[in-house]
Image (cartoon, grey):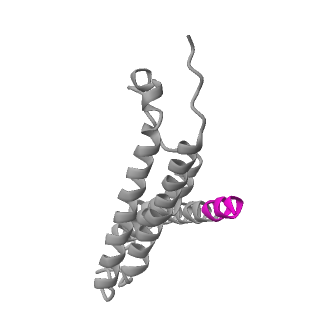
Amino acid sequence: MAEHFDRFLRLLALASGVVLIALTLFTVADVILRYVFNAPLRSVFEFTEFCMALIVFLALAYTGRTGGHIAVDVFSKWLDVPRLRYLPAILAFMGAALFALIAYRTLLETISTFGQFSNMLRWPHFPFRFTVAFGSAMFSVVLLIEAVQSCRARPAKETQ
């Protein structure tokens, strides 16, 4: 089961990469048209905004699952005591709850603004907002899995 979930997250991240390549090509075309032919593409900012939502939220869960997020261990030496061994699980549960709330609120926003379209491209907002909700929900699941795994992990033996 976990293997299928990981494969699904990888496919979402690959889709994010495809969108990133499309955004790169669009930006290069805009720069060439703007500076060589003095004919910039219309709606570059809208296209970029929509693409960024897809890029970030399609790859968020995969990045979290593979440990690709930036982590800073400033307090690790002070928190490395047996009585605080459940702190990572607690933080992961809190993160899962936060991203579940983000997913829920974004889904409500998506439903309530279903008929909105962008100004220049005239693209509907709902697919992009739904992607934000879906990506947040997937990241919430990843954090929940990490929390459960952290609770099940055996504590490290104390050195004396």
Q: What residue appears at the point 57 percent right and 55 percent down from the top-left corner? A: 62
Q: What residue appears at the point 39 percent right and 83 percent down from the top-left corner? A: 123
In the image, 127 versus 108, the foreground residue is: 108
In the rendered image, residue 42, in percent from the top left (x then y), is placed at 36, 74
Residue 5 on the magenta span: yes
The part of the chain drawn in magenta is 1-10
Vertical arrangement, residue 99 with respect to residue 81, above or below: below
In which quadrant of the rendered view does residue 127 lie? bottom left
Q: Main secondary structure of the magenta part?
A: helix
Q: What residue appears at the point 30 percent right and 77 percent down from the top-left corner? A: 109
Name the quadrant of the N terminus. Answer: bottom right
In the image, 32 versus 83, the foreground residue is: 83
Vertical arrangement, residue 142 with respect to residue 158, above or below: below
Name the quadrant of the C terminus. Answer: top right
In the image, 50 versus 75, the foreground residue is: 75
In the rendered image, residue 120, in percent from the top left (x then y), is placed at 32, 80
Residue 110 located left or right of residue 158: left
